Amino acid sequence: MKRFWTVFLTLALMLAFVVPAQAEFQDMWAKVYKWNGNYNADGSAQLTAVTSGIQFKVLRSGNDSLMETLYVYGKDAYTSLTNPVTSTYFDSATYCDGLVKFRVDPTDATNDRYVDLIVVDTSGGYTQIVQNFDKYTHAIVIDERPNVVHHGQTWFSYTTTDQTSTGVTLLSGTLLHRVITSVTTNLDETFIGIGTTGSTQIVKFGDSLASTGFVQTSYESEGSPWKLTWSTHSGGYFIYNAYGSRLTNDTALTFSISSGGTPAAKAQTGSIHYWFSYGPR
């Protein structure tokens, strides 16, 4: 009997160490809504569910560059989920089924609970940053009011020197006010151009990926209909103001990366920040 209890306690202690490690994985989900500025009769915001066309990135809590490792929500077997999550995966019933939905082991040093999100409605580029997102949060609201200046954010990574879509579509009637890039990984003599499909670049940042953080180097103004004028740097990074007519057609927001380095070395990643307004004046 004594031997039985010895074996039993040993197994119990082993399980005590194994179970918490498994329990760190959490299934998180939230519905996405957009708000166009209207209110219901009771004064509450009139929200519309968005069940397609969302892309999102899951970051470590309190970190603007390190991404979490994701798995498909609720699966018995752990199936990897790409991060950032494209709108294709968001729309798929197999993966996200129209929700911000994933399994993750949060790299939250304090309580192993939270992650941060960048959630983008690819139709228009409207963006919501969600800090300290956890398994108890089930609603994300994106501000999409017309004739209001919005701060959008999407990301880039090198795959080709060709013009590449960010997945964001700027809608007909959009006026772009500012464009800024921030860099996560860097390489000297590397350039990034921001533009729209079928046009030359809106702005090209010269040698902009030579260091991490917000871009602080030269630029070349290119491309119609955007007319860019120099504005002094603000808060450690340059700001470029775009003036001119609003877009007359829907068009993808794009980027292209070129470099004097070898293709294997072109591992640049970062974010594109853009300020824009949409709608008739």
Image: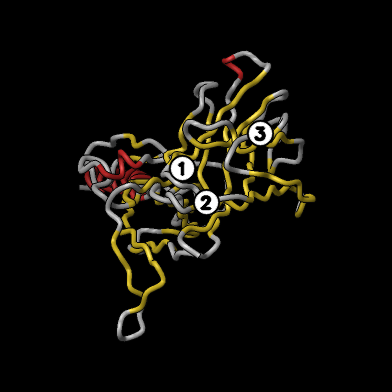
Q: Residues within 10 Å of mark 3 (few under 14, many from 20)?
A: many
**In this rendering, which labeled residue sits more in front, label 3 or label 1?**
3
Which residue in the rendered view is the most extreme toward the right? 232
Q: Secondary structure at mark 1?
A: loop
Looking at the image, residue 36 lies above or below residue 99: below
Residue type at mark 2 is: Arg
Task: Decide which of tag 2 and tag 1 comes sooner along the chain.
Answer: 1
Query: The residue under label 3 is which amino acid type?
Result: Lys
Kindly state the secondary structure of the residue where label 2 is placed.
Answer: loop
Indicate the position of residue 217 as horizontal and vertical percent values. Answer: 76, 37
Q: Which residue is mark 2?
A: 246
Is residue 267 visible in the rendered image? The answer is yes
Q: Which of the 4 image quadrants contains residue 161?
A: top right
Q: Residue type at mark 1? A: Glu
Identified at 32% across, 69% down, the residue is 47
Which residue is rendered at x = 72% and y = 23% of the image?
189
* Distance from the alpha carbon under mark 2 to that under mark 1: 37 Å
Tell me if residue 278 comes above or below residue 215 in the rendering: below
- Decide which of 265, 10 is in the foreground and name it: 265
Residue 133: x, y in percent?
A: 43, 59
Identify the mark at residue 204; answer none if there is no mark.
Answer: 3
- Point out which mark residue 68 bears: 1
